[in-house]
Structure formats: C-alpha cells, structure tokens
Image (cartoon, rainbow, N blue to C red):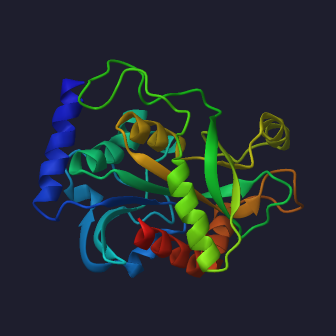
C-alpha cells in the first residue's frame, strides 16, 4: 500500500506540473471520447507520459488526459479508460481515480456504453445510473487499507450521489431530453453476455449491462468523491433482438447520439 501511495503521488506531482487543480473529473467510455472537443484552453497529456499510468488498448479509447474548461468549470477528462478484460488489475483500472482524488477532484462523472436489459430501453437512450450490481464479485479495495485513501469499510448506500442525479435530470429537462434511470450491472467481458445471463441479470434488477464503471465507482466512494454515472444504451442485450453483438455497432450508436450526450454533460458540468 505504501508503494501505491508513492505511485499516486508521483503521477499527481507530474500532472500538477502541467495543469491547474481541476474541479471535476470525467471518464469517457467507448465511442464517447469526442466530448473533449467541447473543452476549451486544453492541455493534452498522453497516458504514456504520466508516471505509473496504464495505457488504453481498446478501439474507441484514445488514451490521453485532456484538461481545460467546460462551461467555465475546470475539468480533467480521461479520453479512454482501462478494463478488467484488458488484463489490468483492479488497482491499475482504478489508479486514475486515485490520482483525480489526490488532485482535489470531488465530483466525478463516469460514462459508459452499455447494453439495454430493460425492455423499454432502446439504442440511443441515456440512462442515469442510480445503483449497480457487481456481477463479478471483485472489489478494488481488497487487501491492506491506508487511511489516507479512505476508510476500511466505505458505505455504498448512495454510491451514485442523489444530488448529482438530480442535477442530471434537471439538465436533461432544460434540453428537452428524456433520460432513463436504472441499475447498471458490471460483467468482465470481453465476450458479450449470453441470453441466459441477461435473463438472470433482469431477474436481479439490472436495467443495463457493461464492462466498466463499477470498480471506479467503488474507489471514488472510498475516497469521498461524489459520482454521477451515465450509460449510453448502444444496443439491446443478448437474446433481446435478432442481431448479433459487435463492438463496431456499439461505436456507431455512440457516434449517432454524441451530440445530445455532449450537450447533456456540458449542461450538467455548468450546473455543478
């Protein structure tokens, strides 16, 4: 754990030599990275330049930090994230969140592309995450705990801050967008789920399913950060439609809805 603290402080020190302390953190999921085009006065830092940072390996994830201003608010955006299926440990996946917290960020917006399980959802919908199901049962807080990073047993009753959900819903209303609200289930990937798994997840109460977000949410809550989760529903889940699933269609749907997604996130940031 002392080694982890050292790595966090090395990365933080490097970033503070390049950017001012940001107010809001953004993690941009598959096909959603174009939101950085809305950032003004940008400073772009490839992950490979940051001490101890992993490197993105997935199509649709550019692999760089972009700092600057959105709606007058100082933001730090991850244009691409890290996934369990890439072979990274949970410590590596959540390392950027630890660094954001060390930088002083207290509001974190996590976005992802997800499959719709709720039968009323359709591709192109945006869902505000109200809760999640950790279908893997893995936890990034396993192992020794350091009080400097957070408590041994963090509460997850409000893992996704209700006040940030309210901000998102009001922002959507002002833009005349209809947001969905639901529960996100985390699976490992990279294979998509089977129809039987989707039926089980629906019974368990999941409305959408994806391969990210939950480890980052756990670590953010551990560090006292407030989390807003937004899922772009890019496809119906396995067994619910007639088409087979592929990553290219996920990226294509994210591209189709990027304009309304970008407007929504910018309006949310402006309201924080």
Whether residue 57 is visible: no
- What's the residue at 49%, 46% (across, down)? 83
Residue 50 locus on image (x, y percent):
21, 54
Residue drawn at the location 59% of the way across and 26% of the way down: 137
Q: Could you tell whether 21 is left or right of 208 in the image?
A: left
- The residue lying furthest to the left in this view is 17
Q: How far across and down, in percent of the image, does residue 17 sit?
A: 10, 60
Q: Position of residue 119 (x, y in %)?
A: 86, 55
Pick whichever, 246 or 12, lies toward us: 12
What count of labels does the image hold?
0
Question: Which quarter of the image is occupied by the C terminus?
Answer: bottom left
Residue 7 appears in the figure: yes
Instruction: Say left or right for 122 vs 14.
Output: right
Frontmost residue, 214 versus 242:
214
Residue under the point 41% across and 54% down: 108
Rendered position, 52 above or below 18: above
Dividing the picture into quadrants, the one containing residue 78 is: bottom left
Q: Could you tell me which quadrant the N terminus lies in?
A: top left
Residue 150 point in image, percent of width and height: 32, 30
The residue positioned 62% from the left and 57% from the top of the image is 128
Residue 202's image quarter?
top right
Q: Residue furthest top?
A: 144
């Amino acid at each position: 754990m002392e080694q982890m603290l050292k790595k966090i402080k090395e990365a933080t020190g490097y970033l503070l030599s390049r950017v001012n302390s940001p107010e809001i953190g953004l993690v941009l999921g598959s096909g959603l990275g174009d939101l950085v085009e809305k950032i003004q006065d940008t400073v772009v830092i490839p992950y490979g330049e940051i001490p101890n940072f992993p490197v993105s390996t997935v199509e649709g994830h550019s692999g760089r930090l972009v700092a600057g201003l959105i709606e007058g608010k100082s933001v730090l955006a991850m244009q691409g994230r890290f996934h369990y299926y890439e072979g990274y440990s949970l410590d590596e996946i959540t390392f950027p969140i630890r660094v954001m917290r060390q930088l002083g960020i207290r509001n974190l917006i996590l976005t992802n592309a997800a499959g719709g399980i709720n039968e009323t959802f359709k591709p192109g919908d945006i869902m505000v995450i109200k809760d999640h199901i950790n279908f893997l049962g893995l936890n990034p807080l396993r192992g020794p705990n350091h009080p400097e990073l957070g408590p041994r047993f963090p509460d997850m009753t409000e893992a996704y801050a209700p006040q940030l959900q309210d901000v998102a819903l009001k922002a959507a209303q002002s833009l005349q967008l209809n947001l969905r609200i639901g529960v996100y289930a985390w699976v490992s990937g990279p294979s998509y789920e089977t129809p039987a798994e989707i039926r089980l997840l629906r019974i368990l109460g999941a409305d959408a399913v994806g391969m990210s977000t939950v480890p980052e949410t756990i670590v953010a809550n551990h560090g006292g950060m407030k989390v807003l989760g937004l899922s772009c529903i890019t496809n119906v889940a396995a067994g619910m439609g007639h088409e087979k699933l592929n990553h290219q269609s996920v990226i294509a749907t994210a591209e189709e809805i990027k304009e309304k997604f970008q407007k929504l996130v910018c309006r949310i940031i402006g309201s924080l």
